[in-house]
Image (cartoon, helix red, strand yellow):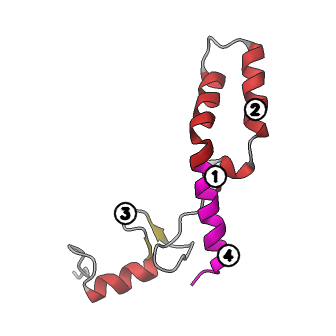
Amino acid sequence: MAKKSKIAKNEQRRQVVARYAGRRAELKEIIRHPATTEAERLAAQRELRGQPRDASATRVRNRDQVDGRPRGYLRTFGLSRVNLREQAHNGFLPGVRKSSW
């Protein structure tokens, strides 16, 4: 089980990312577009740097939906390897079976 403060901080980051996502996409498109003037590009870069650090999507950590474990995360299920195994053995994940060969 992860610390509740870490889980809460990560949720707060998700909200900040969602709030700034539209404007960040616009600024990045201005910077990337070849027809943009140098002055516009510099202004967009300055505004992008002025945004909070947590506005970047790379600051969000993928965590287990059950207990918040940050390591061993499997994106398909939204669970860590530990909880995936436990829930699969208990039959809570339809279509998932234990492999044997």
For residue 76, the mark is 3
Query: Label 4: which residue?
Result: 5
The residue labelled by disc 2 is 47
* Above or below, 15 relative to 70: above
- Disc 4 to disc 3, how far (Cα)? 25 Å
Q: Are marks 4 and 1 in contact (CB under 8 Å)?
A: no
Looking at the picture, which amino acid does disc 3 mark?
Thr
- For label 3, count other residues whose C-alpha is less than 10 Å away and answer few (under 14), some (14-19) or many (20+): few
- Measured in 3D between alpha carbons, the distance from the residue under mark 1 to the one under mark 3, in whole angstroms, is 24 Å
Name the residue carrying label 1. 16
User: In this view of the protein, which residue sits in the foreground, 55 or 34?
Assistant: 55
The earlier-in-sequence mark between 4 and 1 is: 4
Which region shows up in magenta?
1-17
User: Magenta segment, principal secondary structure?
Assistant: helix
- How far apart are the alpha carbons under marks 1 and 2? 16 Å
Q: Mark 1 and 2 residues: CB-CB less than 8 Å, in contact?
A: no
Q: Position of residue 53 (x, y in %)?
A: 74, 49
Side of 15 where 49 appears, left or right: right
Q: Nearer the viewer, mark 4 or mark 3?
A: 4
